[in-house]
Image (cartoon, rainbow, N blue to C red):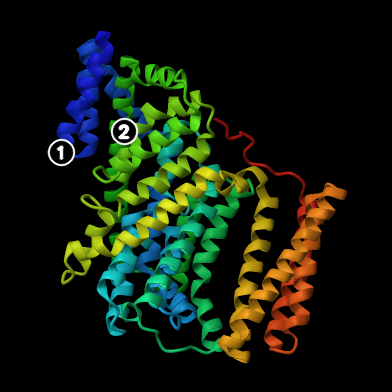
Amino acid sequence: MSTEILVGILGCLAMVFLLTSSMPVGFVMALVGGVGFAILQSPRAACFMMTTELLDTFGKYGLTVIPLFVFMGQIAFHTGISRRLFHAAYRWLGPLPGGLAMATVGACTGFGAISGSGPATAATMASVALPEMRRYNYDMELGTGSVAAGGSLGMLIPPSVVFIVYAIMTEQSVSELFVAGIVPGLLIAVLFCLVILVNCLRRPHLGPVAEPTTLREKMASLLGIWETVLLFILVIGGMFGGFFTPTEAAAIGALGSLAIAACRLQLTSKMLKQALRETVRTSCMVMFIVAGAMVFGRFLAVTRIPAELARGLASLPLPGWVVMGGIILFFLFAGCFVDALALILLTIPIFFPVVQALHFDPVWFGVVVVVVVQMGVISPPVGVNAYVVSGIARDVPLQTVFKGTMPFLGALVVSAALLLLFPELCLFLPRNGIRGTLLLAVVAGGILATSLSLWGSSRVLGAKCAFGRSLGLVIFAWGGSGLLAGGLWKAFPNVWLALTACVLVSGTVFLFAERRRSWRCVMLWTVYTVLSGALFALARLVGPTSMHSASLSG
């Protein structure tokens, strides 16, 4: 073993020891990296390296997205967007078993789209959702667990600070990572809601059903989420469409949140000072951790540990997916003891060369790592979201919060497995651009229309009568139209023609099947069929707008 590798291993062990002594992560990485570099090179070279890295980090134009996105989230929090999101989700999901908990997950998903931070999302929604859950006699194990788990979605739903740091560390596109996190984030939110629904169906006392709401009340509640939708489309849509860079998108998002606050007459000097104070504190913490990671990365580069590790793992007589599975298990274990952002900054310089040597897609790897690290923020002993929720709900013991998050860990494991088996879940949108977005809109619309149609039929025919008939209708309509689309695709290799036929045929079947049940269902399927055909026509006109062409292999 060479001297450089030995010093590198000792440096890593020293860093682990210092982290367990509760020293700040940024200081530990900078200290170990500087001392190790001085031993291997010279103290003068180490001082020059640290000065250069600190100046480069704090003066890097790309890092300005962090304070801008943090400021956008702070303004959104102080203008009460989180409360309006929860109110809208409660109107739609409240009458279901565990509806308030599912509404919390939905509100966390929406607030994560303008926050970018998991702990901030958890803290915000805990102050909003937990009082309502107490009012409806919800079990606090389920309530606090759903808030902590839902808050973790802020790490994955764009704009995510973790994605920004990963992009800087690996020189990937921030826009691609943001877009790649949309589908996995929505998938995890749906799985969280399924976990809540199953638990409340088995044990109804966990989440009592709230008062039913009328359709008028449901539609009126959607007026409270227009700010979130507008900011998300403005920021993510602008980057996705290539209208502006991530930094420009962050600036526009911050300006948009200020404009919303001004329109609501909530832009006071006190609120602005508080938002700026929190933005400066959070941004300085993140920036110093990034600077320390850069210093530590230079030390690792001198030790040649990442290069040797990549060459050794790539030469093993094992399939690439086995090595990747080992890396993911390491992240899963280490995430229970190290903060998510610090863990990514510590380990990416080591494992990213391995990922490149095995020819895995770096965007896919970034999404998978964030999903796996999400488990650490809600699992003992260092689950930061659980500590945040416990700090707000002071009468709930910490072990109760951790116990409530356990069922959601299963949902995260399932989502990670799906991403490993089906990489297109996160690569489809970056590869297909605007076309992929339009297709996703049609699929989401079909799922929503089917769900609302089944719900409407159960209200008209009665739940027992409608279940078998509606299930058969769904299988017949989507299955038959899917077979037709497959046949068309084989005869005329045009995916857009095949998908258009699938939507039109299934929509027509539902339209005629629902005409005797409810005029609302007829309107629903008419609108869906017409809009889907228009979206597919638009997709054909747009042409290929792929954001990402790298393939996932290994």
Q: Looking at the picture, how far across and down is residue 72, in whole percent?
A: 42, 57
Q: Quadrant of the C terminus?
A: top right
Crowding around mark 1 (Cα neighbors within 10 Å: few <14, some 14 to 19, many 20+) is few
Q: Residue at x 33, y 25 (%)?
A: 297
* Residue 346 numbered tag: 2
Residue 550: which disc?
none
Q: Residue 164 vs residue 383: left or right?
A: right
User: Can residue 80 be seen in this snapshot?
Assistant: no
- Residue that lies at the very extreme toward the top in this rendered image: 2
In this rendered view, identify the residue nearer to me: 316 or 132.
316
Residue 462 sits above or below residue 325 on the image: below
Q: In the image shown, does 505 or 248 lie closer to the viewer?
A: 505
Which structural element holds mark 2?
A: helix
Q: Residue at x 27, y 9 (%)?
A: 1
- The reply to whether residue 509 is in sight is yes
Amino acid type assigned to the residue bearing label 1 in the image: Thr
**Quarter occupied by residue 369:** top left
Identify residue for label 1. Answer: 20
Q: CA distance from mark 2 to mark 1?
A: 15 Å
Looking at this rendering, what residue extends furthest in the left direction? 21
- The type of residue carrying mark 2 is Leu
Q: Is disc 2 in contact with disc 1, using a CB cutoff of under 8 Å?
A: no
- The reply, left or right, for residue 40 in relation to residue 192 is left
